[in-house]
Structure formats: structure tokens, C-alpha cells
Image (tube, rainbow, N blue to C red):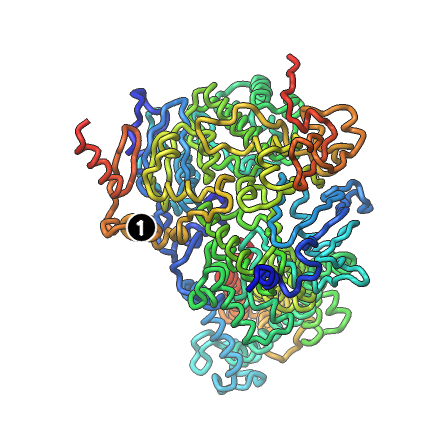
Amino acid sequence: MSPDATPATPAIEATGLTVRFRRRGEPEICAVNGVGFALARGQVMTILGESGSGKSVSLKAVMGLLPPFAKVEGQVRIGGRDVLSLPPAELAKLRGGQVSMIFQEPMAAMDPVYTIGDQIAETIVQHEGTDRATAMARAKRLLDRVAIPSAARRLKNYPHEMSGGMRQRAMIALALACSPSVLLADEPTTALDVTVQIQILMLLRELQSELGMAVVFVTHDVGVAAEISDRIAVMYAGRFVEAGTVREVMRTPQHPYTRGLLASTVHGGMRRQELRTIPGNPPSLAALPAGCHFRPRCPEAVSRCMEEPPVVSPRPGAMVRCVHAERAARAADAVPA
Amino acid sequence: MSAALQQHAALDPRDRGGPAQPLLAVSGLRKHFPIRGGLLNRQVATVQAVDDVSFSVAKGETLGVVGESGCGKSTTARLLMQLMRPDAGSIVFDGDEVGAQDGIGVQDLRRQMQMVFQDSYSSLNPRLAMVDSIAYAPRMHGLPARQATQRAEELLMQVGLNPALFARRYPHELSGGQRQRVNIARALALEPRLVILDEAVSALDKSVEAQVLNLLAELKARLNLTYLFISHDLNVVEYISDRVLVMYLGRVVEAGPVEQIYGRPRHPYTRALLASKPTLDPDRRTTVLPLAGDPPNPINPPSGCRFRTRCPYAQPRCAEVVPPLGPPMDALSGAGGGHIVACIVPEAQAGTEIRHVA
Amino acid sequence: MSDIANPDALAALVSGQAAMPAQPATGYWSAVWRRLRRDPVTILVTLVMLAIVLMAVFAPWLTSYDPYAGSVLRRLKPIGTPGHWLGTDETGRDLWTRLAYGARLSLLAGIAPVLAALMVGGLLGVVAGFMGGLVGTLIMRTMDVFYAFPSILLAIAICGLLGNGLTNSMIALSVVFIPPMVRIAETVTTQTRHLDFVEAARASGTTTLQIIRHHVLSNVLGPILVYATSLISLSIILSAGLSFLGLGVTPPEPEWGLMLNSLRQAIYVQPYVAALPGLMIFITSMCFNLMSDGFRSAMDVRLSK
């Protein structure tokens, strides 16, 4: 859907990723609907969306972390292999090895009864079969790398003995234990204070360029997205509605939802003005509006929005899912360059 | 009608001291939580949640309170609402000291001061329909059921929810933004003069947050409200506040008009806090780390200035004296309007470039 | 904020409750009812339960025999004997009659102690949970003393102390059930007390008693009732056990536990007949258990999201 400009094989490539939740006595819902992207090593793509947009579900689907009643379709290729069709044992080897994930709540991602050092070393031993002493030495280097002071002592700490920011760093160290080529980040800074958030964002940026990882970063915060991304994909009600480079999306948003989201992101320059808002609430996934899902809240909706919106690619590597973008693209084509 | 008369008409009939008298004046507020442990449940440590906090809120203004987790902003709100008993300090509401002999009683205070909490779900009783949740407080204060319900429906209208659709719904049937609107209506049911908004928009999606902020501005103008707006979101505080209070580890480090605080912050912590804010511009990303480390534990905070352990300007005497809140040292150069800062190092206030020792 | 930060949020998302502007306005109890209707197991066990209750109430109309009158000639007839379709017991009394009448005492012995414990234990628990502090500690530590004994031993000890008989066995069981009831009520109350809506009510000048009445009880009652339902099955088994040991109901009263005891000697002669009272105890307690499970999930409208 958004073919990447770089000719090299992408580190992670998703096509038609779809997640349906089906439970007895409940209506089936489609949390993620035909999501596709490709990301080369060394790039950061942010999936930007509000609650219920399906951004976190997409990440969890890639990692095979969804509950059994979730039905996942489509293809996700990491290092050329289709992750979704891997047998469980192979998938487990991939997780924490070639691809790893960090979460909003490090406490939930780490085992409370093992020390930080034990957990990192265990991951290394399991994936690479090194001996314990080597693994421990590498765990110490990892803690140093994520700027945890007095790393040797911190190795013996349990997760609950660390402050929020330190835990987040420790979780990043754990995720990097086997030098993954793909890092999935699920709102890793949302629960942090603003002064700690910027530290973690800068650390991630540094590590990402140093290790040449492809990072898929999920957030609801436009500011965070601007700080970290090379590319942004805006997600609404289970679909990508717009994708492009961070500058394109932030400066010249094409989709009415992206424009609304940026306009309603408060900053000091808006003092004493009434905020421009998107009316209404995000739709329930169980009762999505037909055609363009954003239609009922869209100030620019026309009757054609009742039909499935077209996917337009205004520039290479960019996409917009909107009838208006299609018209704009056609007008641009008509004008001889 | 003369301008003076109009001015007078706009005033609340409950107003006592006139527009110059602050609606709320807090001085020396303190709350320490004992931490008990060990075999005999003895006190082993103290969390100094709020320590000697003083400020005032003028009639009709919005005072923003910012700070990181553990800075005591939510504890302050609960102390003001008398949900906890302060260890020390006085709270004066429109000239009447709370709990004093000839002052204002807690019950009276709670009619005039209300609060909206962060978690829109847990602040509504899951067993009560929206209209009953809103009508509850007026009924407890003696309004007949029919009138209370009518009042609740008017309030639903005022917060932008159609009573025909929402009156009989239950909390789990509403979205977060709708629930927060109901919480605002509930807080307004007793016709308060001061509303404390404790992270009231923090849990909402951005598109919904903007709607609620617009609603708050509209209600404030229409109902002559005064807001105490507590948030960790620096952008939202800048947008909504007239004056801003910056807290760090239970103490006020800086306060003043919003233009002063955001335009020319004097405390090194305020500066670092503002510099940590994501930029919203991919070409001007943060490149210099504004502040290292996590906020220290409020159990056994540093002596003297509590920020000194993270402060690049810290000097030995910062550990010895608690810096008093006072006007900035370069106040002559045009600062003022009540801008106060708690820092004793001139270079720190000026924000002079620090020489890095290689 | 993140849409799938935890499993609960996931469940909310899956059930489409992340945002539901288009849902019809429904009350809490109608939502519970809607969910109950979709749960066939709970409906089935509730119907079986109803049948057992009806059997107890209308026992005299369901049989032409006297539950106390036996006949030496018709002792220990097998199931399917003409005139005695469930056979007869060791003194020749019709077993169907005994089972139907026995449901009265067995249900009473099962339900009454739980009701008593619900009132006393629920009250103590709510008080302990809401007051906390010294009063709460005092109540909870006292309950811990009772926890030190296994429930059946405690019941036997109290029965031994009071002497046997139906009333005494019910009192004994009530005492056994009070501590767990207190603990549940205390836990739920403590959780509820710290929710923001209770704070909000306090901030609006509501008195403590009004808060307990309007905000705490309505939220605490559901979980406590569900727990009480699950205790009924245990109560039926325990009271049958006490009767079986000769501590509860005395012969010739029809009661399932006692019947199981007296038919024990006939287990080699008429094994199926001898097993019938046990089967009734099993079915009834099972029904209460499944019912409580069903109600629990139907009533869970995410008190703490």
C-alpha cells in the first residue's frame, strides 16, 4: 500500500494485515483492516491514532501476542519470512531475537520475581546459546548502553526496585539483548513524566540509528511522533487513512482526519481562541459507518463518501484514503508540468 | 445601563470581598504521609507530599498547576476539597477561613468548591443513571427529587449532551469524553464558584480533549467560574491558564502570569520542564537533554532546594537553605505581575550557559 | 490511552465498548438480563433449581405416601417397582416421597445459614471495610481466629457444643460462613471506598451514612450475593454431612444427608436406590454453583474498569 522508496529488502513488511475478534455472544469486530507498510532498517515509522484505532492491536498481531479468539489474516514478513505462518516454536525464536517489543508498562513486560540481570541474560542464553557468564557480561554492557547508572549493581535489582524511567530503560535493554533488526514500541513513553519521556525518546533515537533497527512506534501523541519518526501512518477505526514522511504528514496533511487531529492538538499559540475540534466520538468498532469510517465526523463529507474511499498515492511512498485526495491528484495530473 | 452597573451585575451575589479579594488563598499548606512498617507498625519514613505550599486564586481566573508525578499537585487538590485533613496551613475562601470559628464550614465550602477527577469511569457510580448521578448532590442538599432531576437535565444540556438520549444511560454505556462531560455537569450541580479540575482532560483522546476544553471555556464565561486546573500537560496548561504554578516535590518553585512562566521561566526546573515538551516540529527536534534522571522519591527529599540534585547550577549553599519564593532577581528589567521564583542562584535564574567541564 | 494496554481494555475493545455512542440506553439490570439470556447453562441450572424448589413446596401433592410411614413388607424395593418408581428405603418408605419432602429440610439447611451469615457477615464486612482503622483491624483479626479451623471441624465442634438438632446445626453453619462473608464484603467495600465517585460524593457534602447507603451498598451487594449463592452449595453438603454424622437432623425426619446415612447399609442390596439422596445433594449443590458462576459473569459490568 505504501511502497517504500528504498530498493533494499525491507526489514519488516506487512500486507493486508487484518485482525478480527470473534467471541461467543458478541458481534464480530474488525480491529485492524488491511494494514500494509514496509520499513527499511534504520527507519522509524510511527502509527498515530486514538484509542480504539487498532494501532496497538496491529503491533500485537505482528508479535503473535493476541488472544486465541483473535483471527489474524494477511502477511507480515520480517527478514523475508512470513511471521504469521510460522509454527509456535519458530515464532518464539523470532520474538526477542530478530524482532522484539517494548511496552507502555514495563512492569507488565518483566517478570517480577527475577532480577533485571537474570532476565536479560536468560534471553541471551536462550536465543544464542552462550554461557551464563558471557550473557551476564553482555547484560551489564546493555545496561551501560541504555545509560543506567552503576549498571553492575542494577543487574541485581528487581523491576519493582527501580523508578519508572529506569524500568523503561531496563526494558529497552532487555529488548535489545539479541540485537533485533526490528523493534516494536507500544506507547513506551505514555506513562512517563515529560522530562523522562524526552530522555527515553532521545535514547531510542540514538540506539535506533546506531544499531540500524527498523522501529515501528505506536503513539497517540502528535508531539512524540514529531520527535521520533521518519514516517507517520495515521490510523483511524482499523485502517491507515494517511501515510507519508513526517514532514509531509505534519506540514501538509491530506486527510481531513489528520488535519482535524493536528488542529485539535493544543499548544500555547492557540491561547484565547476556540479550539478547532473534530465533532463526535471515535466510532465503535462493532458498528462502523459504511464507506469512509470517518464520514460522520468529517466536515468535508460528500455523498461519494458512502462508498469505499479510494486509496491515492500523491507521492511515492505516501498514501491517502480519501475521495478529495483522489480529485486533487487527478487535477494535479491534468496540469502539464 | 452604565458600565459600572454592568460590572456589578456580572458579579456573583455570593461574592463578599469584591473582585480584588482572592477567591481562594492558601498559605503554608502541609501534608506528610507516614509510612508504617516493621513488626510493630511503627512509622519508618515520611512522604512529604505537600510542604509549605502557598498561593492564591483570583476571582474569575484560571490558575494552572503543573509538575511531574509526585510533585503534590493532586494531594493539594484533595486538601483543598477537605478530602484529607492538612497537617498545617490555612485555606481562606473569599475572606472566610475554612474551619475557623467565624469562618466557613466544610459543608458550605463544598457547595462553593467542586472537583472533577481524572478517571471519568471511576468517578461515576456504575449503578446510577447519569441523571441520578448529577441530581444526587442537590438532593442530598435538600432539593426535591423532581426539581433535582429537572436541574440535572438542564445541566446535561449545558455540557452538550441531549437529556433525551443520555439521562437514563449508565457510565459503561458512554465514551470517555461523554462521561467527563457528565462529571463536569455533576460538579456544577451545586452551582460552585470554584472548580478544581484534577487532570480532567488527561485521559481523553486529543480530538475529544479539544471539545472538552472548549466546553470548559464556555462554561467558565457563562457561569462566572474560577478554575484551578491541574495537569501534567504543559501545552494544555499554557492554553487554558491565566497564571501558572509550577510544583516540584511538594513545593512551589515558580509562579506567575502564563506569559512570564512560558516566555521567560526563571527557575531551572521550569526551564527544563518546558524544554522537555515535544516540539511538534520535525525540523526542530530536541537535541540537548533538558534534564537527566527521574524525579527523586518524595520520601526523604533532598535538603535545602529540592531540585538541587538534578540542577546544573547547584551550589553548596543550595543544600543549606530552603530558597524563599520571591520576585526574580532581575525584576527591574520589566518582570513583575506577581512573578515569583524560589531560587537563590542568579545564574540559574538568568539561565546563563553553563560551562561544561570536559 | 493506549487502546490495548491491558486485557480489560482489550475486552472492552472487543465488546465494542471502547466507544459506544450508538447503543440504545439500557439500565444495569436489563444489561444483566440480556447477558443471562445468552447463557444457556445458567438458564438450564436455574430451571432445574426451580424444579427442585417446586418439588419441595408441593411435596404433599406430588405423592400419595406418608414420608414417615413404612412397611416391613415393602423394604428396599428397586427403582421401577410398581407404585414406588424410585424404590423404597430400608424401612419400606417410598423414596420419591422421602426425596421430595427431604428437599424442604435440605434446602432450608442449605439456605438459612447462608442468609444468616450474609446479614451478619455482610454488615461486619462493610463496616470493617468502610471504617478501616482500629475497628476494621479488630473485626478482621477476630475473623482470622475462626479461619484457623477447617470449616467442617469447626461446624462439628459447635454442633457438639450446642447439642444435635436441625436448629443447632444451622447455627453452627452460620458461624462457619460468617468469616469468609466478612472477608469478601470487606474486600469489595475497601475497593469501592477508594473509587473516585465516593470521593466525589464526599466532596459534595454527602454524609458517611448516605454514602454507605447510596454508593457503597449498591455496588457491594452484587458481589456479596454472588458469593453467597456459591456458599449455598457448600452449606447443603456440610449440613448433609452433619446429618450424616448424626449431628443435624434426627431420624425419622426426611433429609438427604440423613437418608444417605441410613441407606448406607443397603449399598450392596440396592446400590442405585442408596445413591439417590447423594445424587440429589450433588445436583442441587452443582446447580447453585453453576448459577453463581453464571450470575457472576452476567453481573460483571466492570465495576473497576
- Please name the residue that numbered disc 1 is placed on: A295
Residue at 55% over, 80% down: C101
Residue A250 spot, x, y in % from top left: 39, 34
The answer to whether residue C176 is visible is no
Looking at the picture, tell me which residue is in the foreground, C164 or B180. B180
Query: In the rendering, at what x and y percent does residue A195 appear?
Result: 59, 32
Please state if C262 lies on the left or on the right of A12 as rendered: right
Residue positioned most to the front: B2
A164, above or below C147, in the image: above
Please say whether residue A49 is visible from this viewpoint. Answer: yes
Amino acid under label 1?
Arg
Number of numbered discs present?
Answer: 1
Q: Position of C127 compared to A110: left or right?
A: right
Residue B215 at x, y percent in the picture: 49, 54
Residue shown at the point (76%, 72%) measured from the top left: C162
How dense is the environment of label 1, judged by Cα within 10 Å: few (below 14), some, or many (20 and up)?
Answer: many
Front-most of C58 and B70? Answer: B70
Q: Chain of mark 1?
A: A
Q: Is residue C268 above or below residue B326?
A: below
Residue at screen point 59% across, 41% down: B258
Q: Residue at x 24, y 47 (%)?
A: A308
Assign a secondary structure to mark 1. Answer: helix
Vertical placement of B143 versus B2: above or below?
Answer: below
A165 is higher (above) or lower (below) than A272: above
Q: Quadrant of the N terminus of chain B?
A: bottom right
The foreground one among B145 and A327 is A327
Along the viewing direction, whichever of A122 and B293 lies nearer the viewer: B293
- Quarter of the image for the C terminus of chain B: give it: top right
